[in-house]
């Protein structure tokens, strides 16, 4: 059974659909004692996982059972926010008599962070620099698990649910072929309701600014948020590193708020962003300094810069830049403490998502985005060969070749971590490069 689920998942090109893009067949081949189903969907405004639970709860539960058996877990836990009452009901109806439990989460950010989810459901703390498997847990997103159920029935990943929210007249969630241009996906949600807008792929906390409307959707894109160009969620991303550093040096008052609300610090990890900012202020950025290398422990949740800091300093940006610089110099994470205990005050320092949405200036967009089962038929899809962690897929089709939805277009290179890529529409291969395969629907 283990080999067959992992192999079916590998063949179907399933990757972490919650944003991480980690190849799921690797997790399916692991051994763990708990399978954790992540239905927290903690990024403000995103609704795709919740809408999937409403539409396909049975597929999620089936995927959970398959993955639980594949990793040999004695326990499978579905974690969903209590506030999503309809999704909770849908899952309750789909749960078997035994073998899969439901745990209800509070509506706090970032409840869906894997480390926090593991702690909140099992009481285990993932070690510094570790992964949930280090404490015997495999975590899969709900969308990923519905794709696992499909994979075992021979259906590869060719589409996914995507939420469009923000400055659009009809926010909603759609099932979209992988590779559909983002501009076309956004247009499904009606007319723009502001003039000068920017699109964020992923949520407002951890998402990235989309380069342009022709950028293709990927297997890991859960949603697109349209915001005015001058919205704080946009300007914090467009500020240059030099500006971010200058502000940190000039105004940080060492109030500690960023550290006191850092979810990883509260879990017991030695990540103290105020100390990194202090190092920045005094130019003590030697790469072997503990408060520089602690950047490796940051999950880039954005809590420090988008909620905690009263002076709008951006510790996350600084930590991300340090992490990139350390990687560029080939320096590895020296922080590997195990046997950690979460801080006793953690439960009092969790931030309700409603307060976060208000602070971010997103309340006016925080409405429903129900699933609309309308056919989405792009004239052309662009399938990126790297939509996942690891090596890019190797193209296995040629220009002019006819393909059907589900046909293999990209194979995992021999001996590499990676994921297969499949045609998401019927059509003709228009172009092939090492980066992408374009298919025209004709
Ligand atoms: S982004 Fe900030 S709050 Fe989040 S883990 Fe990193 S340092 Fe902590
Ligand atoms: S919250 Fe802001 S001002 Fe306070 S220590 Fe952190 S970066 Fe400095």
Image: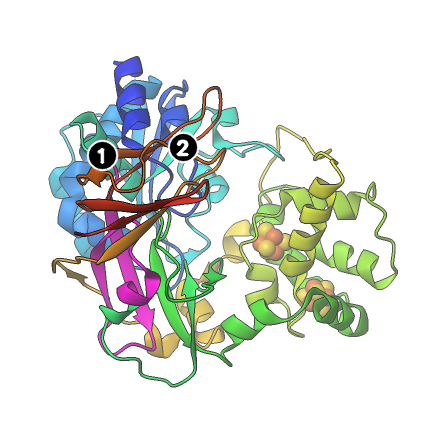
Q: Which of 21 and 68 is in front in this view?
A: 21
For label 2, the residue is: 23
Mark 2 surroundings: few (<14), some (14-19) or many (≥20) residues within 10 A: many
- Which quarter of the figure has residue 248? bottom right
In terms of secondary structure, where does tag 2 sit?
loop
Please name the residue that numbered disc 1 is placed on.
407
Q: Nearer the viewer, residue 31 or 241?
A: 241
Residue 42 pos. (x, y %) = 39, 55
Residue 77 showing in the rendered view? yes
Q: Which of marks 1 and 2 is in front?
A: 1
Q: Which mark is residue 212?
A: none
Quarter of the rendering occupied by the N terminus: top left
What residue lies at 77% left-to-right and 48% top-to-bottom? 291
Per the rendered image, the range of residues in magenta is 156-185
Q: Position of residue 204 (x, y in %)?
A: 45, 64
Quadrant of residue 36 within the rendered picture = top left
The vertical placement of 359 against 20, above or below, is below
Q: How far apart are marks 1 and 2 (CA)?
A: 19 Å
Q: Which residue is drawn at 76% across and 40% down?
A: 329
Q: Where is residue 278 in the image (x, y as percent from the top left)?
A: 81, 60
């Amino acid at each position: 059974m283990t080999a067959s689920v992992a192999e079916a998942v590998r063949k179907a090109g399933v990757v972490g659909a919650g944003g991480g893009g980690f190849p799921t067949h690797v997790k399916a081949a692991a051994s763990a004692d708990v399978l954790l189903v992540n239905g927290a969907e903690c990024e403000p405004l995103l609704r795709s996982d919740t809408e999937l639970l409403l539409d396909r709860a049975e597929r999620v539960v089936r995927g959970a059972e398959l993955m639980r058996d594949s990793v040999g877990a004695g326990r499978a836990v579905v974690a969903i926010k209590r506030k999503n009452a309809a999704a909770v009901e849908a899952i309750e109806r789909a749960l078997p008599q035994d073998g899969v439990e439901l745990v209800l989460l509070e509506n706090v950010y970032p409840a869906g962070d894997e480390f926090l989810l593991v702690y909140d459901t099992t009481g285990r703390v993932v070690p510094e620099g570790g992964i949930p498997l280090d404490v015997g847990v495999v975590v899969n997103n709900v969308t990923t698990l519905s794709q696992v159920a499909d994979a075992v029935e021979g259906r590869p990943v060719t589409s996914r649910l995507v939420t469009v929210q923000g400055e659009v007249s009809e926010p909603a969630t759609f099932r979209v072929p992988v590779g559909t241009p983002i501009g076309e996906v956004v247009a499904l949600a009606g007319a723009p309701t502001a003039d000068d807008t920017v699109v964020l792929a992923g949520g407002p906390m951890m998402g990235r600014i989309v380069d342009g409307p022709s950028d293709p959707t990927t297997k890991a894109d859960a949603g697109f948020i349209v915001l005015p160009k001058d919205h704080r969620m946009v300007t914090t991303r467009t500020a240059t590193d030099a500006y971010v550093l200058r502000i940190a040096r000039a105004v940080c008052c060492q109030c500690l708020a960023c550290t006191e609300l850092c979810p990883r610090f509260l879990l017991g990890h030695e990540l103290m962003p105020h100390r990194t900012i202090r190092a920045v202020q005094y130019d003590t950025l030697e790469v072997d300094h503990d408060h520089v290398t602690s950047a490796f422990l940051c999950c880039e949740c954005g809590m420090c810069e988008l909620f905690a800091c009263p002076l709008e300093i951006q510790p996350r940006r600084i930590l991300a830049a340090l992490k990139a610089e350390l990687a560029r110099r080939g320096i590895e994470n020296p922080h590997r403490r195990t046997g950690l205990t979460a801080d006793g005050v953690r439960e009092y320092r969790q931030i309700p998502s409603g307060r976060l949405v208000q602070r971010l200036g997103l309340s006016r967009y925080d409405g429903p985005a129900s699933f609309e089962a309308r056919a989405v038929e792009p004239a052309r899809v662009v399938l990126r060969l790297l939509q996942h962690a690891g090596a890019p897929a190797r193209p296995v089709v040629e220009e002019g070749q006819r393909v059907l939805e589900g046909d293999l277009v990209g194979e995992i290179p021999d001996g590499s971590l990676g994921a297969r890529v499949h045609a998401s529409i019927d059509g003709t291969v228009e172009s092939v490069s090492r980066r992408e395969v374009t298919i025209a629907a004709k």
